[in-house]
Amino acid sequence: MTTAIEVRGLRRLFRGRAGMFGAERVVRAVDGVSFSLPAGDVLGIVGESGCGKSTLGRLIMGLLPASEGDVLVDGRRLATMDRRERARLIQPVFQDPFSSLNPRHRVGEIVGLPLAAQGDVPSAQRRDRVMEMLARVGLAPEMAERLPAQLSGGQRQRVAIARALVLRPRMVLCDEPTSALDVSVQAQILNLLAELRHELGLTYLFISHNLAVVEHIATEVAVMYLGRFVEHAPVDALFHEPRHPYTRALLASVLTPDPGLGIPDVGLGESYPDPANIPTGCRFHPRCPIAVARCSSESPEGRTRDGRLVECLLDGAPAEMALSA
């Protein structure tokens, strides 16, 4: 199976100071992420706010330079390409469809802008491509003359999807593409993305907080914590047999429709991870409910079992061994 994207040891550091005279702080927003994704698959990336999901997306898009590492699409390094060439390979769909669309431009202009930026598509052909893409995302031809303010939230996100696909890219990066929409419209957009994936042979990177959304659309899931993937597995395996304690905590945090059950206690305590002060050993050990002594000093980086990544020293250990370690 052809590999659509390969990420090798990707890192991004941000440097700053706590106040004017404070000591320098280094935030490791993305800290050694590696993965490959077959063409036509969907990788869902989940984790708490601040774990590095969106920074990873910007690195892959080329919107931020990497401190270290490489991103390859179809075997070609994105860092060696100019902006137009990258745009032909990978396109984004952002969270808020209203703020991502120019309010002064009409829908036809917005969808056709990537074609105009390439500079090699005649205007008549651009118009045909725009109308074809509007039809693919379920918008009537007359929508091309409307302004974003005249559309509903779901229609605006369809416009954003049409703009992303008009160049016929190999890959689409979706950063929380349904979180600004109500539940019924979310389902429509997810079904549209699934249909377009099969029709056009697309590969998706899908960043989301919503585990139910990721379970619905993804073929693989990566769980991110403090800049690293702590678990990466096929979607069914991860949701039915989570191995990392953080993954189990995320799945346990999902609210149920029964108000009598209240808010679930996932056992992570009240502390919050600080990317400028990453602990030694396993970075999850200060919050881990099953951590043992060696978790604070021994790093689980690079451990895999049964073809899936799980960055946990106790993965696969018998229960009695884990308790006595």
Image: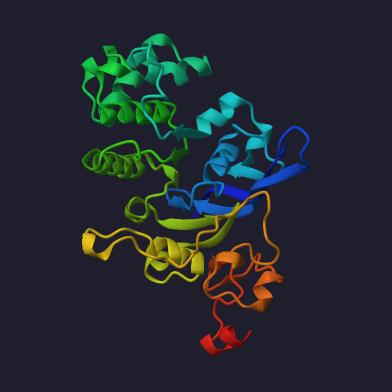
Please tell me which residue lies in front, 189 or 71.
Answer: 189
Q: Is residue 115 left or right of residue 216?
A: right
Residue 4 placement (x, y as % from top left): 52, 46
* Residue ID at (62%, 78%): 292
Q: Position of residue 92 (x, y in %)?
A: 46, 33
Residue at 26% across / 39% down in the picture?
182
Indicate whether 271 appears above or below 95.
below
User: On the rendered structure, is 229 left or right of 163?
Assistant: right
Question: In the figure, 17 relative to 243: above or below?
Answer: above
**Residue 264 location, quadrant:** bottom left
Please name whichever residue, 16 or 61, is drawn nearer the observer in this view of the structure.
Answer: 16
The quadrant in which the C terminus is found is: bottom right
Q: Nearer the viewer, residue 273 or 196?
A: 273
Q: How many marks?
A: 0
**Image quadrant of residue 96?**
top left
Residue farthest to the bottom, as pictured: 320
Residue 109 in the image, given as x and y percentages of width and height = 38, 14
The residue shown at (32%, 53%) is 216
Residue found 60% across the figure and 67% down from its top:
285
Above or below, 81 relative to 34: above
Residue 25 in view, yes or no:
yes
Q: Is residue 222 left or right of residue 280?
A: left
- Colour treatment of the image: rainbow
Judge whether residue 258 can be spotted in this image: no
Instruction: Give coordinates of residue 120: x percent, y percent.
Output: 51, 15
